[in-house]
Amino acid sequence: MSDKPLSANEGIKIRSNYLRGTIAEGLADLSTGSLSEDDQQLIKFHGSYQQDDRDLRPDRRKHKLDKAYSFMIRIRLPGGVATPQQWIETDRMADEFANGTIKLTTRQAFQLHGIIKSNLKRTIREINDAAMDSIAACGDVNRNVMCNPNPHLSSIHAEALRAAQQISDHLTPQTRAYHEIWLDGEKVESSEEEVEPIYGRTYLPRKFKITIAVPPSNDVDIYANDLSFIAIVEDGKLAGYNVAVGGGLGMTHGVEATFPRIADVIGFCTPEQVVDVAEKVVMVQRDFGDRTDRKHARLKYTIQDRGVAWFAAELNRYLGYDLGPVRDFVFTDNGDRFGWTTDERGVHHYTLFVQGGRVVDTPGYPMRTGLREIAKVHQGDFRLTANQNLMIANITDERRAEIEELLVKYGMARSHERSALRLASIACVALPTCALALAEAERYLPDVITVLEDELEKFGLRHDSITIRMTGCPNGCGRPFLAEIGFVGRGPDRYNLYLGGGHAGQRLNKLYRQDLDASDILPTLSPILEAYAKEREEGEKFGDFVIRRGYVTATVQGDDFHANIKPEAYPAK
Ligand code: HEM
Ligand code: SF4
């Protein structure tokens, strides 16, 4: 055991009495729009972040006003599934309590932004009234369990989705704090009810993320998660899942001890073992994760430090049986399949491109209104994709014409008639709400793509899918370190440019230029795109090309993410 002191958050968790802290009292205090520092940490476990509008900071400072505080609420949707009624309710709450938009996140959740403290309780209560919740959407616990909405293999997908929901239920914190604070649940005095059988009083050292993927699509980016299950289909049946552990993307600029890492595939389990395996992976990390340093606390560091073999052996010990040998699987890409698809049952699905995952009405494109109208008549469900897009799912033959008509009426029928680059883009929220953002992302990436599109057109690359992702800081919420072209904010209008990620999300990228000025993005990328158009081999993906042609070296695993960077990556002093 380390003799370093525990990180401050460990003390907050211990003192919190199973995540209560003084949140209830803080909500009642109307003299300020903010919560105490400790409660700001605790409220994450309830699915909310305290934020402030950073666009308004300078003006408010000038007028000696408090920051414009508000809260973000993240709504968990295991597997990204929402019913039409849940869509309608979320849409209503976006107007009534938030900023009039719904953000579809890269982990298949809804986010509402701009909720003021006095509306927080009511919003969370109404989320629960709509049979959704926000508990454990953030915080040091297992978060929303993801599952890819693979429309081509609907029966396998249905099983995978069921597993995602079971894992989610099993790993949901048991504390009554959420009910007491937000739902006016009765206070339970007996401490027996308080026990967290899986987590214990201090929960996990850090956040924990689980996904399930049905190959060949890796749209959930399994390599970026703490724990993933890869469905293995044999003779048309679900044989079980490969188990992958130790992925995670967040790092800190200038701190080489922090790095993104891709998950290792360590074994195979049967469908019946899935929940048990998830529980035991969580428990190993609970017991061995580093609680002294939050920048070193994710499972990826536990595994990097102690070794994959150690982890696999420890997991088998916790399980009381051994995982089976890894089975063969192939991922082809991590993007979405847009437009109409029809599955093996003859049921239809329409995947809509949603730029930056922001569901909003703009002049000339009333997407949010259109989706509301669709939700009113839709009898299937909605599936949020891990790429911030939306599948209007499970539409029968008889209902298809009606949905199609609405898609046309609201301008959504051709949402995917965009460049393949734009369709394969992700941007995190960043400014103005995210307190950690160093640069723009969601508000800026669309413009970067517009500029690049002219070049792509010139080089004949309009239909070539190249993953492009931008985040406002290196925490990695938009999974930039797995992109073929990744931008990570360093300061206002300044980005690190990373190249060479795997097109199926299987390889991390590498720093190509540090501190690139926004105005230099086009001149830097244009010659590389041109070379790709002219010199690529048959079927060669952009991420592979830039490595073969020596623009960057391949990153093999997290521990060489900061190594073998070419000197020209750094700006001249
Ligand atoms: C130190 C690490 C991290 C911190 C402190 C952090 C913090 C945050 C914050 C404050 C937000 C809210 C932004 C807003 O809505 O205004 C956010 C959003 C989000 N984060 Fe993270 N994050 C971290 C790493 C990651 C990673 C590695 C992932 C996934 C690979 C992730 C997934 C998400 C998702 C899905 C959102 C929702 C917004 C979106 O889809 O753009 N986060 N994060
Ligand atoms: S990557 Fe950074 S800027 Fe973007 S949402 Fe995450 S924490 Fe905020």
Image (cartoon, helix red, strand yellow):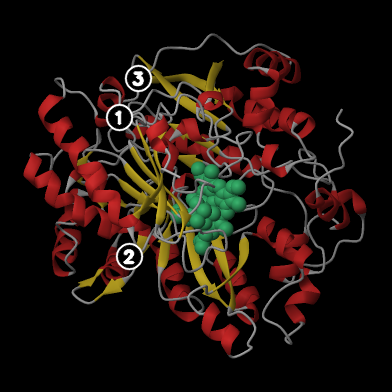
Q: Nearer the viewer, mark 2 or mark 1?
A: 1
**Dot 2 lies on which element?**
helix
Q: Secondary structure at mark 1?
A: helix
- Residue at point 75%, 15% (across, down): 317
Quadrant where the C terminus sits is top left
First in sequence: mark 3 vs mark 1: 3
Residue 330: give its label. 3
Q: Residue furthest front?
A: 573
The residue drawn where x is 73% and y is 17% is 314
Foreground disc of the pair 3, 1: 1
Crowd rating for badge 2 (residues with CA inside 10 Å; few <14, some 14–19, many 20+): many
Q: Tell me if residue 458 comes above or below residue 110 in the rendering.
A: above
Give the image location of residue 510, x and y in percent.
42, 32
Give me the disc on residue 146. Answer: none
The residue beneath circle 2 is 375
In space, the residues marked 2 and 3 are separated at their CA atoms by: 35 Å
Q: CA distance from mark 3 to mark 1?
A: 18 Å
